[in-house]
Image: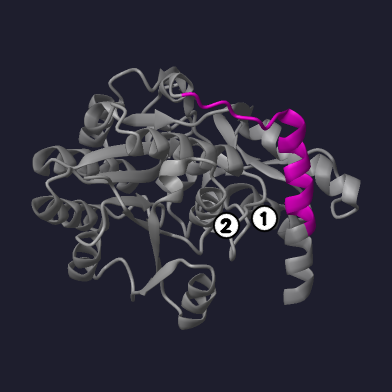
Amino acid sequence: MSYTKLLLTGATGYVGGTILTRLGTSPSEEIKQLTISVLVRKPEQAEVYSAKGITPILFQDLKDVKFLRQVASEHDIIIHTADSTNPEAAEAFIYGLADRAKTTGKAGELFHLSGTSSLGDNPITKRFLESREFSDEEDIYGYMKYREAIDSYSQRATDIKTVQIGEEVGVRTYIIKAPRIYGRGTGLFNQKSAHIPWLIAGALAVGQAEFIGDGAGIWDDVHITDVADLFEILLDKVLRAESIPSGSKGIYFAASLRHSWKELAEGIAAAGVKLGYLASSNPKQMSLEEAAQKYTGGNLLTAEVGLASNSLTIAKRAFEMGWKPKAREEDFQHSILEDFKLMYALKKADA
């Protein structure tokens, strides 16, 4: 029996919407044969998808795990992009896929979008230091369990739970751990990334780009369309019944470029000056406490891991699957410029 029904979460979001667009234009004959459903919260969103031949399923939120399990049990494959920090939702989707498998006799498949902040260290507080590169050919699952035993982090806990429950009930899981995602999305609703526009909004608020501490922490970057490419490649292989790593070995990185936090702030400053929105091309330092108050509601751990840490990954396994990211450094810098225009326009509209 072949797979026929796919459920996508986060379809109205930045990543999920872009993946949905990619699936709709995919040359893969296997993907073309899929019936795609999407979870949406608003009737007007449902109408948009219905008009495009996509089945909308109205729901309240990801806390309704009983409903999520029921919906999952009606699908063969799930691409979950809605929340990488909710282990209960991931668990419900996996149990639902396992319920489906009892009827079809074919193992369910879950593609889960996660991030690389779960590998990030603490260069400011020094509570945990880890500046080495990670390859997705390593035992990343084992490393995450080691880190989680030291310091709990919701994204990491969700990844671990996804693998554990999947292996317990026979659902194959694939975790795509994307770094800082940039670029304009191609979905029908939200097309704006999160990380860089967030920092641009902060720069506009004080008139100068900022970074925490010495800004020496380094993160990888990837263009949103390259992320969609990886999902398409992995999905196509699964539909073709190719054997690819799953479960504890099915963790895929999606790194393409690499920048320090200070370099990112310098790029934001340069774009702001070029557009006439900032006066100084030199970003300024801020303390971890200042950043936490400004960006993370006072949460020091989230601010440090998400805005100052080292998180270096090599996408060896993804490359072996045939992934070839297309975006280059000039695309990254152009994206900052475009994000600045957007955030400036939004600020003026709110004024």
Relative depth, front residue between 311 and 211: 311
| Residue 294: image tag | 2
Q: Against 158, is 320 above or below?
A: above
Mark 2, other Cα within 10 Å: few <14 / some 14–19 / many ≥20:
few
Q: Against 86, is 280 above or below?
A: above
Residue 116 seen from this side: no
Q: Is residue 149 left or right of residue 133?
A: left
| Residue 202: image tag | 1
Amino acid type assigned to the residue bearing label 1 in the image = Gly
Q: Is residue 307 left or right of residue 192?
A: left
Q: Residue at x 10, y 55 (%)?
A: 103
What range of the chain is rendered magenta? 322-341
| Residue 96: image tag | none
State the SS at label 2: helix
Q: Residue furthest bottom?
A: 43
Q: Against 222, is 65 above or below?
A: below
Residue 44, x across and y down, in percent:
51, 81
Which quadrant of the view contains residue 142? Answer: top left
Q: Against 294, is 62 above or below?
A: below
